[in-house]
Image: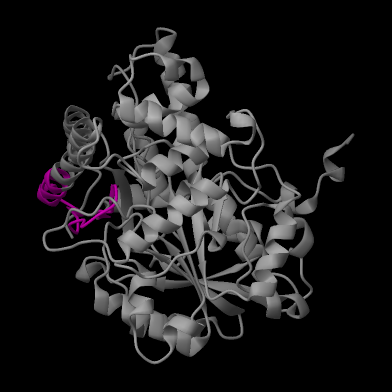
Amino acid sequence: MSSLQQVNPTVRGIRASAHTRLHGLATHIAQDITQGALKPFKEVIDVSAGDPHTAGFKPVTFVRQVLAACLLPRLLEEETLPLDVRRRAQRLLEACEGGSVGSYTASSGMCHVRQSIAESIVRRDAGVPSHAKDIFISSSLQRALMPYVTAMSSNDGMNKRLVSLTCCVKVFIKVLAGGQEETRVGVLTPVPCPHTLPALLDEARLALAPYRLAEGRRWAVDVDELHRALKSATGRCKPRAIYISNPGNPTGHVQDWKSIEEVIRFAAAERLLLLVDEVYQDSVYGPGRGFISYKRVLFEMDGGYSDTVELVSFHSLACAHMGEGGLMAGYIELVNIDPEVMHFVDTMLCTDISTPVTGQLALDLMVDPPRPGDLSFDTYSQEILLTRAVLSQNAQRAQEFLNDLPGMSCQPAMGGIYLYPRLHLSPQIIEKAKVLKVEPEDLYCQMLLEEKGVLLGAGCQSGETASSYHLRLCILVLPDTLEEVLARLACFHCHGHASSP
């Protein structure tokens, strides 16, 4: 490849997002500090996205002990590790080809781990069946999602069979992307949504059909708004799926049973595939709220919904209490997928490299942790409860603090790892953003980073009104770190950057 002109035009059209630009600036500032540059702060604090271990949370002891024994099997012969740890490591090694984590696995994931995941889903959903053949392990949520969205962007001939096709590989991009439809396929997408989702859908040449979450109702999903969004998309794209984040990323909203039923009925009536992000299912802390899966509600509904509605759900090691994002593993479960399509998925998966074995083993430990009576149970429980307690306390503390700031308001979170406060900006910063041709939230976050060393996520997203400004604040940090962030934010915010609501 000798010149830029030979690069794929789609690739040449990719532009760095505001999130990427801010992270680049944060890295540059941190390097300047390391090299002795004088700043009004000692370090950059990143609360734009969740990374528990970087934020100071310790890895779960049981997980790291079992992985250590799998990586160094001679530890199985020593008594330095608890007996239940050594026994679990032995079982996992027996499930590996050649008894080693260095062996390849099936691209859809290790059979043993997929079975463990299916059994955990049965326990979670009060007996609703789950089968290992419907579980696919992936190295990331986005990697798992990509095959769906690229399949939906293919031509009509393939799309009729592959609209809900799943696999965990990007090979489907090459096979299915770039269809010849005049009207792009669309996905009903919440506003706000995970900040990486719009770029992912755009990469697959899918159109976003935004539906606004109800901020005044703690960011609830409104079915009337879903109908409005679907009607609005007519003529611009062909919506074939709806994306749901529950618990909400970045809103912290947790749906109740009735809300989930309403969304399922809507999807069924409009023949939409349900793509449900349930990564933060173990991080629900709102009073009187607990996690309810879409699958459980679907299977307990009358009227034949459980046999017809197509559902894809996601979970990941990057969840709050595990925080093992660096091990790169997650899983998807399929519901109501044509068996012939499933066979095709298995065939296609053989062309891809499997998810790292250590990540797959960690998934097994996530879905099947120590149980009462196990030697590691007390330590494991204490560590998990501590993380959840910090998350819950931080959510309440930050929400109250932000609501006390002039020109800021914040709905309470019921789960997840983010708050999504509304920002009432001064006319001066809005005008300056126009001159610089950037979004006002982007400018606010850039100025906050440069002046106070705090990296927040800018909330500007497609589908938000021009006068609606928001920030994304990760609360999965140590309490002392949160206090420092809030102090720096208040100092910056109250010096001419806010207006009255």
Res 202 seen here: yes
Identify the residue shown where x is 28% and y is 77%: 259
User: In the depicted view, which residue is nearer to us: 69 or 42?
Assistant: 69
The verdict on residue 151 being magenta is: no
Asked which colour scheme the image uses, the reply is: one colour
Residue 443 location, x and y as percent?
A: 40, 43
Residue 335 location, x and y as percent?
A: 50, 71
Q: Quadrant of the C terminus?
A: bottom left
Q: Quadrant of the N terminus?
A: top right
Report the span colored magenta: 396-423
In the depicted structure, whether residue 14 falls above or below residue 36? below
**Is residue 99 shown left or right of residue 445?**
right
**Is residue 120 shown left or right of residue 99?**
left
Which residue ends up furthest to the bottom in the rendered image? 303
**Is residue 70 shown left or right of residue 216?**
right
Residue 21 location, x and y as percent?
A: 51, 38
The verdict on residue 402 being magenta is: yes
In the depicted structure, whether residue 242 falls above or below residue 473? below
Identify the residue shown where x is 40% and y is 80%: 264
Residue 337 found in image quarter: bottom right
**Is residue 481 shown left or right of residue 2?**
left
User: In the depicted view, which residue is nearer to us: 343 or 491?
Assistant: 343
